[in-house]
Image: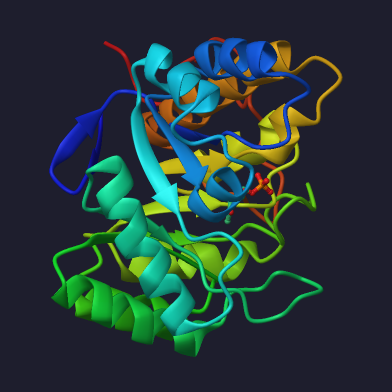
């Protein structure tokens, strides 16, 4: 079970609702993923007129929690206004806070992110900030009251997987009490497994499933990978070594400790 602001979920995968070839495939893929939380871009859906119409009906049929996001916002004010609209529309204190700083990489703006998170938390929001792997920024967000933090694996839509593994390992080690979700840049099920093996609590992804040749099969593959990664983490992974160690050292003693 993973805990997000006091709510328990059995799935460790959150999934986006954009870019699918059709509404029916979106629904089938989300079902196949086993995700219990979907993220919805308020700006995109309201601009396209989807919220409140057919799109919202499709989401409702899935019977999942909705995590509205501020995708596309580029300033503190824009993000705060979007979050307020989302709270009204979706009747939830949850907001996935995204403030883009760089148009080419869609890299989050850490300064605006911290400022917007501070405003929103004071206003009663439960903030899920999308950030880079920078530890200090994550610590600032935690200190403000973020109980969930969502560092990227790689730029949104890049499918590159975990680029800065060491920094993400460090963040996990230094923020043991925060629910950490890898968000963005995962391209293959093995990337998701790696995130869970590192001890991350969950992953959020969209493009890799929506743009797969078979989104429903890919959603299932990610689901299995998330389960495998978490099971491996809980089983206690052995650390890598710089030297060889024979796995059958002595004939007749198959167990690593003496058995009487
Ligand atoms: C940060 C953000 O908006 C994510 O929800 C994103 O959509 C997921 O990233 P990928 O599309 O790379 O999986």
Of residues 134 and 194, which is closer to you in this image?
Answer: 134
- Residue located 47% across and 32% down the image: 13
Residue 251 position by quadrant: top right
Closest to the observer: 258 or 237? 237
Res. 238 in view: no
Q: Nearer the viewer, residue 21 or 49?
A: 49
Q: Which image quarter is the N terminus in?
A: top left
> In the visual, does 184 lie left or right of 114?
right
Residue 183 placement (x, y as % from top left): 54, 52
Q: In the picture, residue 236 is in which quadrant? A: top left
- Residue 126: name its quadrant: bottom left
In this rendering, does residue 52 appear at all?
yes
In percent of width and height, residue 33 lies at 54, 18
- Colour option used: rainbow
Query: Looking at the figure, which quarter contains the C terminus?
Result: top left
Give the residue at the far right of this rendering. 213
Residue at image coords 78%, 23%: 21
Q: Is residue 69 above or below residue 111?
A: above
> So how many labels did they put on this image?
0
Instruction: Please tell me whether residue 202 is drawn above or below residue 246 in the rendered image.
Output: below
Q: Is residue 139 above or below residue 163?
A: below
Q: Residue at x 49, y 42 (%)?
A: 40
Q: Nearer the viewer, residue 107 or 84?
A: 84
Q: Position of residue 152 (x, y in %)?
A: 58, 60
Q: Position of residue 26 (x, y in %)?
A: 63, 20
Residue at left 37%, top 24%?
36
């Amino acid at each position: 079970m993973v805990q997000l602001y006091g709510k328990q979920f059995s799935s460790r995968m959150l999934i986006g609702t954009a870019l699918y070839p059709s509404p029916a495939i979106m629904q089938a893929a989300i079902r196949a993923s086993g995700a219990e939380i979907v993220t919805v871009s308020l700006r995109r859906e309201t601009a396209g007129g989807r919220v409140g119409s057919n799109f919202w009906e499709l989401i409702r049929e899935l019977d999942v929690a909705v995590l509205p996001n501020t995708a596309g916002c580029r300033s503190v004010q824009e993000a705060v206004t979007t979050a307020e609209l989302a709270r009204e529309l979706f009747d939830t204190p949850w907001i996935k806070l995204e403030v883009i700083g760089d148009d080419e990489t869609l890299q989050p703006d850490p300064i605006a992110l911290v400022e917007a998170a501070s405003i929103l938390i004071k206003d009663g929001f439960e903030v899920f900030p999308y950030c880079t792997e920078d530890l200090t920024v994550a610590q600032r967000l935690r200190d403000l009251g973020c109980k969930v933090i969502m560092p990227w694996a790689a730029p949104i839509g890049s499918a590159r997987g975990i680029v800065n593994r060491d920094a993400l390992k460090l963040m996990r080690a230094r923020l043991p009490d925060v629910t950490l979700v890898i968000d963005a840049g995962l391209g293959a099920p093995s990337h998701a497994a790696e995130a869970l093996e590192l001890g991350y609590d969950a992953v959020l992804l969209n493009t890799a499933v929506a743009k797969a040749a078979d989104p429903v099969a890919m959603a299932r593959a990610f689901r299995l990978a998330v389960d495998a990664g978490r099971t491996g983490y809980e089983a206690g992974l052995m650390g890598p070594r710089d030297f060889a160690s024979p796995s059958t050292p002595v004939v007749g003693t198959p167990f690593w400790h003496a058995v009487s």
